[in-house]
Each structure stands twice: as structure tokens, then as C-alpha cells.
Amino acid sequence: MHLQKLEAAGLIVGSLELSEDGKAMKYFEVTDFDVHLTAAALAEAAKTLSKERS
């Protein structure tokens, strides 16, 4: 499920290959991407964090 979301977001690319015994194998590779962080973006993201600690 997580790989599907990452693939849908364009952060990874999946490809199907056949193994020697004929089974389908799906391999994933990370795509190039940039993440730009600003103080404002970090402050906004921090608001979504839970205050509970386990």
C-alpha cells in the first residue's frame, strides 16, 4: 500500500520482471526529486504532530 502511494506520487517507479522460475517480480527504484523546506513549512507540519508519547 505504501509503495502504491509513493508510485502514484511519482517518487518511485515500479517495473515487472520475470524470475528464472517464471514468477513475476516487481522492483522499485527511487526517482529524482527535490524537497524544499522552509521555516514556515516546518512550523505548519509540526502542528499535525501528536503530543502523546509512548
Image (cartoon, rainbow, N blue to C red):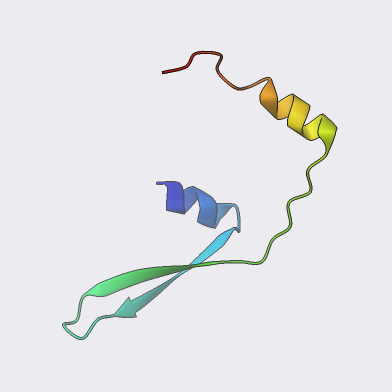
Q: Is residue 9 left or right of residue 28?
A: right
Report x, y in % for residue 18. Answer: 28, 81
Q: Quadrant of residue 25?
A: bottom left
Query: Furthest-left residue in view?
Result: 21
Query: Furthest-bottom residue in view?
Result: 20
Q: Quadrant of residue 46?
A: top right
Q: Is residue 17 left or right of residue 20?
A: right
The answer to whether 39 is drawn above or below residue 9 in the figure is above
Numbered-mark total: 0
Q: Nearer the viewer, residue 11 or 8?
A: 11
User: What residue is at 59 percent from the left and 22 percent from the top?
Assistant: 49
Report x, y in % for residue 54. Answer: 41, 18
Report x, y in % for residue 11. Answer: 59, 58
Q: Quadrant of residue 31?
A: bottom right
The answer to whether 39 is drawn above or below residue 30 in the figure is above
The answer to whether 39 is drawn above or below residue 10 in the figure is above
Report x, y in % for residue 48. Answer: 63, 22
User: What residue is at 83 percent from the left and 33 percent from the top?
Assistant: 39
User: What residue is at 34 percent from the left and 79 percent from the top?
Assistant: 17
User: What residue is at 83 percent from the left and 39 percent from the top?
Assistant: 38
Query: Furthest-top residue in view?
Result: 52
Q: Is residue 44 left or right of residue 17?
A: right
